[in-house]
Amino acid sequence: MERKQYTGLDVSRETNYKKINDLDIKFVEIEKAVALPFVYLDSGAIRRAGGILDKKDEYVEESGSRNGYLKYGKAYDYDDSKIQHIDEEVIWFGYFYSHWGHFIIELIGRMWFIIDHYKGQKIFYISQDGDDFGSVFFEFMSYLGVPKENILKIHKPTSFSKIIIPDYAATEYYYSDKYVQMIDKVISNSDYQHCPFPQHENIYLSRKRVKDSKVKDFGEAEIEKKFIENGFVSVSPEKLSLREQISLWNRAKNVACINGTLPLNIIFSREKLNLVVLNKTNILHEALISIHHVFAHPDITYIDVFYERYRSLTKNIGVGPFFLYPSAKLNSFLKDNNYKGFDNSSLDDFKMKIYYPQI
């Protein structure tokens, strides 16, 4: 029986996300290579510059990415007298952006290589100033067998005796079994079954304590309160280790969260799970729809909780701002699932002024 949805969005639509053959995922080895650090150019189709040059000083196209929101990779002039020399074979990670959703869906894509080929090499990445690997990113890599000290950022032009550049096994537009195998390895090596994180049957993943939430998420508190009233435990996932989050996604029975990065963590779920995704905008989250077709273990129920009048103010699904309220659709979901609903489910302008007096 098809799951009932509480949304006006076409969440059953097909996206352009496709599966490619593992045989199409290869790697190149560049000897006497030079890695250029990240530089943000003022103009051009590719503004995120940096990547690998071969011994002829020609840009290696495989070291960048020409597609997607985070496309990058371009050569630029540099002072070759200031090159740092490292006489080692290393592995190229590519561009890093400190955003968990982008990291797990696309940026980690080259690291399939280390599952069967890792020999303790250092792994180098490029990123904007101040945008470096943090604890949860290091933890992810540790479950692939790479210690923290082997993950390094390129700060100035650096030459290597050899640099290995793996293709991406996953991007915004495609994935392969190598990507799935990589996520499986992270789950397995996390040993989440023995994680001491408290086990709860019903969990609400809150965004209230995320730094930028106060300036772009308005109204979540009322929605969170309603789930808590119905026996859900509120959890701030950004306060958890990756192991704790993997434990949560495999040991809870029901998880509810605002749409965005949070539900993308279904990639770590391998058990029966009911996932409730609360739509904060009328903009379709295609990445979630795409990835759900790959990791289709959880059943997803979508519920619109965005205020229609102000939807045009939302720039995109990441930036916001988002105006949320306990909608009639949410009330219908609660009552259909034998939860406690609320009275007067439709909010009038008077109530909106209480929630959003600045509008």
Image (cartoon, helix red, strand yellow):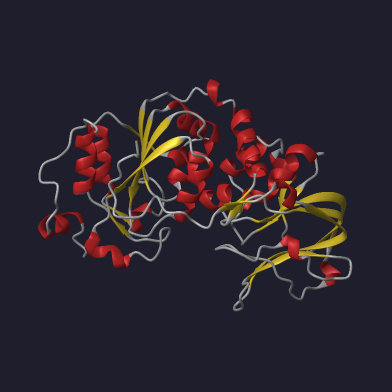
Q: How many marks?
A: 0
Question: Which residue is pictured at 39% across the width and 28% down the height?
Answer: 253
Q: Residue furthest bottom?
A: 43
Q: Is residue 33 left or right of residue 76?
A: right
Q: Is residue 353 left or right of residue 316?
A: left
Q: Considering the image in quadrants, where does the C terminus appear?
A: bottom left
Question: Which residue is pictured at 74% across the width and 41% down the height?
Answer: 114
Asked which quadrant contains residue 352, the reply is: bottom left
Location of residue 10 in the rendering, given as x and y in whole percent from the top left corner: 36, 54
Q: Is residue 155 left or right of residue 190?
A: right
Q: Is residue 45 visible?
A: yes
Location of residue 219 in the rendering, given as x and y in whole percent from the top left corner: 26, 51
Location of residue 303 in the rendering, given as x and y in whole percent from the top left corner: 30, 47
Location of residue 14 in the rendering, given as x and y in whole percent from the top left corner: 46, 54
Question: Which residue is pictured at 57% across the width and 63% down the height?
Answer: 68
Q: Is residue 326 visible?
A: no
Question: Which residue is pictured at 61% across the width and 78% down the height?
Answer: 44
With respect to residue 328, does 75 lie above or below? below
Q: Considering the image in quadrants, where does the N terminus appear?
A: top left
Asked which quadrant contains residue 212, the reply is: bottom left
